[in-house]
Image (cartoon, rainbow, N blue to C red):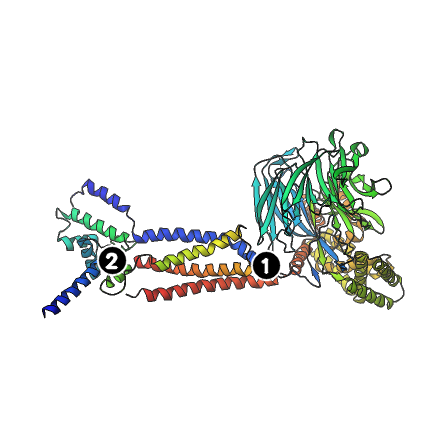
Amino acid sequence: MVRENADGIEDLRIKVKEGVSKLRGLEVGNELSVEILSRLAEGRRTASELVEEIYQVRSSDEGFYSSYARVRREIRRLESKGLVSTNVLGRNRPYRLTDLAVINLARIGGESKQMPVLPPIDILIYLATAASLIPLLFGSMGRFIDPSEMVTLGLFGLFCLLLGASLTRFFQTLRRVF
Amino acid sequence: MPPRPSNLEERDRSERLVLSMRTKLSIGGLCFFTVIVLLAYTTTPYVATALRSLGQPGVEGPGNESIQEKDPGNESIQGNPDEEVYVRVTGALIVATDFGLGSSTSRVYLYNYADGYPVELWSTELEGGVMSASLLDLDADDIPEIVVGTQRSRSPYGTHGSQSLQIFKRSTYDYELIFKFTVAPTDADIARGRMIDYYDNGSRQLLAMLDDNLLLIGSKSGVPFITEYLGRVGSYGFDVADVDGDGRVDIFHSKSATEDRFGLIENMGNGEYVKRNIEGPRPWPIDEIRTGDVDGDGDSEIVMVGLGAYGNPVMSVYDYRNGSYIPIWILNNSVLESAIQCVDLGDIDRDGILEIGTGSGKYAGEGLAIWEFNETDGSFYPKWRDTTLSSVEQMLSLRIGPVDKTGSGRLLGLGTGKLYVVGYELGELKYRGINLHGSSMDYESIDLWILTADGMSRDELESLSVSVRSRASSLDDGILREMLLDCCDKTDMYFADDQIKDAGDLITLANDVLILLENPPADIDSILHSVRDYAEWMGEQGYLFDMLTCLETGYKIVNILENVDDIHGGVLLVDQLYEAAELLNQSPTSALGIAEWCNRSDVLAMASRIQGYEDDWDNLVSGVPERDGRILKGMLDSAKRKFAVRDLKSTEAGLVTFLDRLGQLGVEVAEPCLSVICILLFMMGIHGSKTHNSKRDLP
């Protein structure tokens, strides 16, 4: 029984360690970040609402602005990591979790790794798009061993294919943090 | 609300500098894709060129005509008896430029000379004055590019603006600028370009002069680029040829105006060149240099012409003998009392030896001349000369080459608003002037590109000769029958002497006549009707003068057609009249061009009538109400414009014919196909990426 309990504690410890490690990968470094993310997971909140919920202070209270600044700074940091976002337009702009944050928070307890803002495969596609343009550029400047017309057109076709892929990946990445 | 502490405001400002991820991504992505799209846009001409090359295996027109390069100058079109291949000349492209004095712009014109007179195909306006123009095939696709040298800020007293070398390449419907290289303001002159196999590796590059420097320009996939600077030389002339007989092509060029010699860049092989100076009597300053076999000894000579100031000659001929370049003939200005400003070499009399064609500036006294080698004393004498032109025309550029179906060389000189064509007509050297774009045009440079049909072997020519003889024998007795049989006899003599070109030119021309006789043009009545229809149409439009011209010319053509059997030596005339009838059905204004060909004096009479109306204008409109006077003036101006520009409608028709002949069908189909393929690939990229990403995003 004791043995079973000890195994259970060990499993829990490993899971907690992995969870913390993933949280670090998510760059959620402090308690306030976790608090903000957990509040936003329940629904959209303005910065004032978050301050009121987290610190239990009202805007008329004396310590409101110091708490507000702290929350606002943390939100800025989370925004720069692509985890929190708000509307581009409008007067009252409540914050919400981005798709990237939802995906990565959901993966904390699972087997999958955290998703970076720019996955390696995306970077590879962008680089391939730029690389496929290089021979065409050199060819157009006449500083390239003259390829056959089929090779030129093939390269151009490949460039179109990669440009389409990279544009799509870019808009999907943008959508994840928007 | 309590006031906010100032330190919080500062902190707020610093926080604003922390950009959200979406902002960072948006800015980064915008920059990345903008750069990518801009770079991709710069490659589109290159990709389009590749597409065109792919869709253009050979430019073929109706019948068996195709476009092939032939240097109209010192390379004879004479078929090689060993290979026994005859290539027939079908016409020529002519590029002519306007210097544009008194204007900030000038123009480049491209004409087709296939029908015995130039029909404008294309023109463009350029900043500054165009000082030289060449038709050269840089990318070896058998279609010439137009190479022009321009200079800004020029005046009659000198040229001091920046110089540009510009290259135009033919696209589907136009000529596009594909290369432009500009240098700082200079007073140097720009000479016509030449093609040279500079590295002796079988590929030819463009040798061009800009700001007294020689540039070597290569081409990759149709895109020109400067490969080498060959150093400083003098203004004006240069040419390339193997004069010393070592099998390698050397470059001969003028030196700066202060140097009393001319230069040689000698090809030592393997792309190595050595600069040398050649001393000796030569024009000062040199205006133009040409090389070719002018004395019939089988190797090339150097011919230089120029101002001949301070007692220097106006023309010198050098040959390479006993290991050095020596002058074999000089022409002092004391003989001519004039300068020579342009020169070209070509075989005009079909004797296998090149003649020297020269032209001089206005009031310089010399006009146009053709010089031939005198074997008895080794000198050159003027075989033909017309000094009357010198008082009215400024001959700054001329070219010699076979430009029509006769295959005979003709000298083409550019005057003020006129193209002068010198050649043999009924056994005599004669010139005729053709108005191009009005007398105000100030032409500066001309170049030719010879159009040829597919080659014919000797066997094919001989069988054609047999066929012509057989078909001619079946004609009714008459002058045409005798003439054609005489042509067959002469052709047999040419074959016996291995003169394949002469035989080919004669028998193909005779065959053309027979084809016309076997397929006579539309009946005369229908042509007459069409003339009257057009005259009526002109009358409805209010063009009284054009109506008159149309009727006069049309009746003349019909009259000649009715009496075609009575025309002696009418081999060419029949051909021309047939085309005249065709053209007349399309455009009444082109009848003027036909009239000029048929009988120049009529056109000149028309011009003098217009001039007469203008000179006597005040008397003509005296007593006429002012409003009617203005209308009459408008009508006369309209007639003048049509007379000067002439073939507006047939120019358009010529352009369509030209494009048809150049066979762009492949490109027209391939271009939309490529666009569709690219869009499909683009969509495939989007679809593939979406599918992949949607699977990957699942937690």
- Say above or below: B206 vs B308: below
Tell me the residue that label 2 is attached to.
Answer: A96
Q: Is residue B442 visible?
A: no
Write down the quadrant of residue B67 in the picture. Answer: bottom right
Q: Position of residue B494 (x, y in %)?
A: 84, 58
Say what secondary structure mark 2 lies in: strand
Left or right, B115 with respect to A166, comes to right
Counting labels gives 2
Where does residue B295 sit, x and y in percent of width and height? 80, 44
Q: Dot 2: within a 10 Å radius of its alpha carbon, few (fewer than 14), some, or many (20 or more) residues? A: many
Closer to us: A58 or B511: B511
Pick the front one: B195 or B27: B195
Kindly indicate whether the residue at mark 1 contacts the one at mark 2 (C-beta within 8 angstroms): no
B266 and B627: which one is in front? B266
User: Where's residue B332, x and y in %?
Assistant: 79, 33
> Amino acid type of disc 1?
Ser
> Which mark is drawn over residue B555?
none
Residue A128 visible to the viewer? yes
What is the chain identity of the residue bearing mark 2?
Answer: A
Which residue is at a point 18% across and 41% down the rendered structure image?
B5
| Residue B564 relative to residue B198: left or right | right
Indicate the quadrant containing the C terminus of chain B: top left, top right, bottom left or bottom right.
bottom left
| CA distance separating discs 2 and 1 | 56 Å
> Element at badge 1?
helix
Q: Position of residue B17 (x, y in %)?
A: 28, 46
| Pointers 2 and 1 within a single chain | no
Residue B572 sits in quarter = bottom right
In the picture of the structure, the residue carrying the numbered disc 1 is B53
Q: What's the residue type where badge 2 is placed?
A: Arg
- Specify the farthest residue to the right: B477
